[in-house]
Image (tube, grey):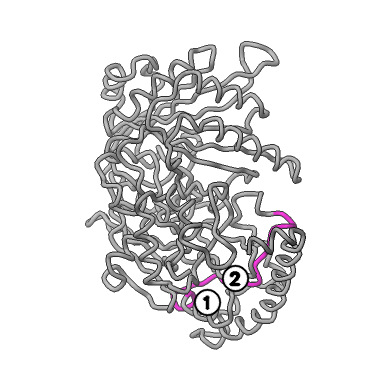
Amino acid sequence: MSSFCSRFPSMFPFLFVFLLSFSWATSAHNHEDFLECLRVQSEDSASITKLIYTPINSSYLSVLQFSIQNRRFNTTATPKPLVIVTPSNVSDIQAAVSCSRKHGMHIRVRSGGHDYEGLSYVSVLPFVIVDLINLQSVTVDATNNTAWVEAGATIGKLYYSIAQKSRTLGFPAGVCPTVGVGGHISGGGYGLLLRKYGLAADQVIDAQLIDVNGRILDRASMGEDLFWAIRGGGGNTFGIVVSWKINLVPVPATVTVFTVQKTLEQNATQLVNRWQYVADKLHEDLFIRVILESVNSTTQQGKTTIRASFNSLFLGGADRLLSLMEESFPELGLAREDCIEMSWIESILYIAGFSRNTPLEILLNRTQPSVRFFKAKSDYVKEPMPEVALEGIWERLFQLEVGSGQLIFSPYGGRMSEISESSIPFPHRAGNLYKIQHLAYWDEEGIKESKRHISWIRGLYRFLAPYVSKNPRLAYINYRDLDIGMNNLGNTSYKQASIWGIKYFKINFDRLVHVKTKVDPANFFRNEQSIPPLSA
């Protein structure tokens, strides 16, 4: 193959486009057979017709675009599905899986549409989207501190449903309420309860999954290996998770939040540096993350500066918080007037950026106030960065316009250091001081702006290489980043997949491959960063 490519370098792109065009033409025919198959297999052929959208339907584009959370994947050039199926029950999903296999249709599964690289609703191969938007029920059992939540529900709906039953129960999931539960837990999932209770996936005690053969499996029938793999091993790899059974966790009736903002002129560099030494060692009831971005200076007209926002949730009252801060992080200068006491469910709204008097029903919205273009990356930090590294970050943030570049430092320690790195596929536990999320945002359409911002975030990522984890440079799968490695369009080798797989999963990657080989040896459920079977 290498000699063929070296002798005929110009033929590969042509051959690729030819094969892809042939594949799309073939599948355009196949998708008619696929639709007929769905109608035949459905318990009610008339009702399933209402759950299917093809490009000839007037509502096709609105259904497709409703759950696209990154404008990078909502352009005229973005590949579109041949069919969108919006199942209303388990049998609809079983039919979609069975008919996709029978008629050679690639399948993508979407719960909330927040995949950072759009892999839940975009494919360069001809494909079908199974959109779980109609499967969003949440059943809370406050007596036993558990809940069943369907994969199409959002985190916001889960939080809202818990609060309707109890103000002293919570769940350690993310801060963005429009994220779908299915994908969030499949990749681990975390929020401001991380240091107290670990990940969302750490609290899963059962699940319902439809496998490649269309069987509906629970924990007992799928076995412990597969149950282990779906709790953090990434979505769209082992089957379609229909619902999760989760443990709810106790939260106090009163929690305290604060956001203390410091600019460079207010010693932000020194404070962020100090934060690195204390954040993972604070009491597990206290979570303080740092959000870094450039802002317009309020003291120097026409100038920009760096703002560090110390954004916190404390599981308790303000008096105890102030005492802990005076003991552990007095440099921040936290004052009583910075502290706001509220219920845990109100803290969800606060951290998400809503005002104090916002009705809880806002958590039921599936759409964000605004959707932007963005590219993200992730890192893990095991030793504090020197101040010169922080100053290098500031320099790079100044290269973009205000509001376009952001880094979020999320502290580890606490419960995260106590859970084994092989407990579930997510391996990033003891030894990590904090995680970095790198973000580049923009609003202007066009290839030029996309290239500029993506080039910027890649440059920032290269700059940070000496200061973050190494051999491998670790990453978090829910902050998906195709820059760190990709599978082939069809089947891929273990060696190729391990390039990105080891970064997300460390030694757990091998076990994930063995599970995949057992449950989906033909690699039906696949994407650019799905676990491959050894047979591939």
- Taking the spot 44% from the left edge, 47% from the top edge, the residue there is 503
Above or below — where is 237 with respect to 253?
A: below
- The amino acid type, in three-letter code, at marker 2 is Val
Main SS of residues in magenta: loop
Numbered label attached to residue 128: 2
Q: Nearer the viewer, residue 358 or 371?
A: 371
Residue at which label 1 appears? 96
Mark 2 residue crowding within 10 angstroms, few (<14) / some (14–19) / many (20+): many
Q: Badge 1, how many Cα within 10 Å: few under 14, some, many 20+? A: many
Q: Earlier in the sequence, mark 2 or mark 1?
A: 1
Question: Against 371, is 401 above or below?
Answer: above
What residue span does the magenta drawing correspond to? 75-93
Q: Position of residue 121 (x, y in %)?
A: 59, 61
Picture residue at 59% right of the left edge, 51% below the top: 69
Please state the total of marks drawn on the protein image.
2
Question: Left or right of 334: which side holds 16?
Answer: right
Residue 126 in the image: above or below residue 339: below
Q: Position of residue 339 (x, y in %)?
A: 38, 24
What residue appears at the point 38 percent right and 42 percent down from the top-left corner? 345
**Element assignment for label 2:** strand
Query: Percent from the top left, x then y, of residue 385?
Result: 44, 24
Q: Is residue 86 magenta?
A: yes
Q: Is residue 179 magenta?
A: no
Residue 362 in the image: state x and y as whole percent: 50, 47
